[in-house]
Image: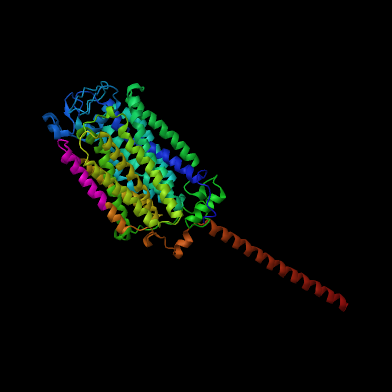
């Protein structure tokens, strides 16, 4: 196997990873652009956190918080709007962290077009997740039936078109815009389960960490890039500024769809320009025969072993680890700006792009973790299972450890807190070498379906996390935030322990395809068809030879009879 390994960097499978990287970046950019564009869309008038000219003390309510701020509810839309206002304004906020008082000045970004209340803004921002939640398992099922390429293409094509329609829908009626966002979530919900199905046919076991890591790391780059892009387009874009955000990303998505349609194939067998050695290497590493291009897609339908999946310890290990990892991710994504402002008294504009540094580290660790796990397995230093356990211990345990250290940081140590937050979020990227790849380890054919199930359950973290955070931080004091971090640490540690005890790296018995007589007759295998054709040809030659022999014998008999007749005469 090792002797037949082909170069990775110039291979078609690595090219596929880069295309998936760009696709994931666009997917997340199309998803999160509204969180920033909405600042330019809504009219001024409704006060938001730190945008009403009030003063706020450093280290939150521990040093005193205004009564107006205590009584003002905090929701996701307000946090997103407040965060973006601070990030896009160039000179509005002036802070001095060595003092206890920090002045906040009004930050107008323009008149806006829509007079949406807080409730409406919350509905607009939350509509995506309602659609996203409902289509996760559908993505895995469709990819197994019709092929991952078509599912991903339809997902991105639909999302891109919906992005182009979004400005017009928002101007027609807010309800239509909410529907567009829900449909966007539904279309994107199928993408990542389908991508897992794609990699089950393309990624050799010893390269899964690197290939999937490169692919999914694009999501973090999409989040990081959409922030400054939205700020520039809001101020200087065409058609009023904010619509250009949707138009530009929609056009970029359509261009990616064209690239995807022309260069990607469901399997190595179907790829038109892949080398023979690379195709053979991938197929042998996955234990496949040299099937025809239709064989992997046109398999006979098989019943989903729901009972076996529910009873499987390996599945529960992944689901628990998945939920814990996403809980930490959601709490950091939604809580980080508020924590820095409430507890440390730091304004985002005084930090520049410091809030994006943790996610740059996250991107780097995702790729580093994939490479390290593959190297450890290739050198036989660790088994596949122990690599997955180590990755989850580093991701979840490491994140919990750095969050714990933050609780001991006093006010004034802003740089230290930023460093610890960067390490906490960055090290969690190792989870992509843990539970994410483990779906492919235990059930390659059902990986997309199981990932859809895991994403569906982990969406609960996205719903419950902000609610819990709002309940526990009514004044934004350091004590309240430490409670939030403590609960997050507990969930992370329990997730790492559950994965270490229950996880498996072997293909589960219920995930293996049983070759019955009926299945063997229905499976369309190029090798089987070739053998059958050869058998038919051989049989035809044998029959023709027999007929020729019989004719020769008859001819010889006729010649002998004629000779005997001549002799008698």
Magenta region includes residue 489: yes
x%, y% of residue 366?
A: 38, 44
Q: Residue furthest right?
A: 569
* Image quadrant in which you'd find residue 236: top left
Q: How is the image coloured?
A: rainbow
Please state which of residues 257 and 405 is positioned toward the viewer in this rendering. Answer: 405
Q: Residue at x 47, y 43 (%)?
A: 16
Q: Can I make out residue 146 in this image? A: no
x%, y% of residue 244?
A: 36, 26
Q: Residue furthest left?
A: 67
Q: Residue furthest bottom?
A: 568
Q: Residue at x 48, y 44 (%)?
A: 14
> Residue 432 vs residue 561: left or right?
left
Count of all numbered marks drawn on residues in the image: 0
475 lies above or below 266:
above
* Image quadrant in which you'd find residue 235: top left
Q: Is most of the magenta stretch helix, strand or loop?
A: helix
x%, y% of residue 359?
A: 33, 38
Q: Can I make out residue 518 in this image? A: yes
The image quadrant where one finds the C terminus is: bottom right
Magenta region includes residue 470: yes
x%, y% of residue 159?
A: 37, 36
Range shown magenta = 469-494
293 lies above or below 426:
below
> Residue 184 vs residue 104: left or right?
right
* Image quadrant in which you'd find residue 340: top left
Q: Residue at x 66, y 66 (%)?
A: 542
């Amino acid at each position: 196997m090792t002797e037949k390994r082909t170069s990775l960097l110039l291979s078609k499978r690595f090219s596929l990873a880069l295309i998936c990287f760009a696709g994931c970046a666009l997917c997340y950019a199309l998803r999160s652009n509204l969180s920033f564009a909405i600042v330019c869309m809504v009219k001024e008038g409704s006060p938001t956190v730190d945008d009403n000219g009030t003063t706020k003390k450093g280290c939150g309510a521990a040093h005193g918080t205004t009564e107006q701020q205590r009584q003002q509810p905090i929701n996701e839309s307000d946090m997103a709007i407040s965060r973006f206002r601070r990030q896009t304004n160039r000179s509005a906020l002036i802070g001095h962290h060595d003092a206890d008082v920090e002045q906040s000045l009004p930050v107008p970004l323009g008149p806006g077009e829509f007079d949406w209340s807080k409730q409406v803004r919350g509905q607009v921002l939350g509509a995506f997740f309602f659609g996203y939640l409902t289509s996760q398992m559908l993505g895995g099922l469709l990819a197994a039936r019709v092929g991952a390429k078509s599912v991903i293409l339809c997902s991105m094509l639909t999302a891109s078109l919906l992005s182009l329609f979004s400005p017009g829908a928002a101007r027609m009626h807010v309800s239509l815009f909410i529907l567009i966002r829900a449909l966007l979530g539904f279309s994107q919900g199928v993408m990542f389960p389908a991508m897992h199905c794609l990699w089950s046919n393309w990624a050799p076991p010893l390269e899964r960490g690197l290939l999937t890591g490169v692919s999914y790391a694009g999501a973090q780059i999409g989040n990081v890039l959409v922030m400054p892009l939205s700020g520039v387009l809001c101020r200087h874009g065409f058609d009023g500024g904010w619509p250009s955000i949707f138009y530009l990303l929609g056009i970029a998505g359509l261009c990616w769809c064209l690239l995807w349609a022309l260069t990607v194939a469901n399997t190595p067998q179907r790829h038109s320009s892949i080398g023979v050695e690379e195709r053979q290497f991938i197929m042998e590493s996955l234990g496949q025969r040299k099937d025809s291009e239709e064989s992997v897609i046109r398999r006979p339908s098989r019943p989903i072993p729901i009972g076996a999946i529910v009873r499987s310890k390996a599945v529960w290990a992944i689901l628990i680890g998945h939920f814990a990892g996403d809980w930490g991710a959601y709490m950091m994504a939604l809580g980080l700006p508020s924590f820095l402002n409430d507890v440390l008294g730091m304004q985002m504009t005084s930090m520049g792009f410091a809030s994006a540094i943790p996610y740059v580290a996250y991107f780097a660790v995702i790729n580093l973790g994939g490479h390290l796990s593959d190297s450890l397995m290739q050198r036989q230093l660790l088994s596949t299972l122990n690599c997955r356990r180590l990755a989850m211990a580093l991701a979840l345990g490491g994140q919990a450890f750095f969050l714990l250290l933050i609780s001991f940081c006093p006010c004034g140590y802003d740089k230290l807190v930023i460093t610890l937050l960067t390490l906490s979020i960055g090290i969690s990227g190792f989870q992509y070498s843990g539970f994410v790849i483990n779906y492919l380890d235990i059930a390659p054919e059902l990986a997309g379906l199981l990932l859809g199930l895991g994403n569906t359950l982990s969406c609960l973290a996205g719903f419950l996390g902000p609610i819990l955070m709002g309940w526990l931080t009514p004044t934004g004091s350091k004590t309240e935030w430490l409670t939030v971090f403590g609960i997050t640490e507990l969930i992370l540690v329990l997730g790492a322990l559950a994965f270490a005890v229950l996880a498996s790296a072997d293909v589960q018995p219920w995930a293996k395809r049983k070759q019955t007589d009926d299945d063997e007759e229905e499976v369309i295998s190029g090798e089987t068809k070739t053998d059958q054709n050869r058998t038919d040809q051989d049989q035809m030659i044998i029959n023709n030879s027999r007929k020729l022999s019989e004719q020769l014998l008859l001819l010889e008999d006729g010649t002998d009879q004629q000779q005997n007749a001549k002799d008698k005469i």
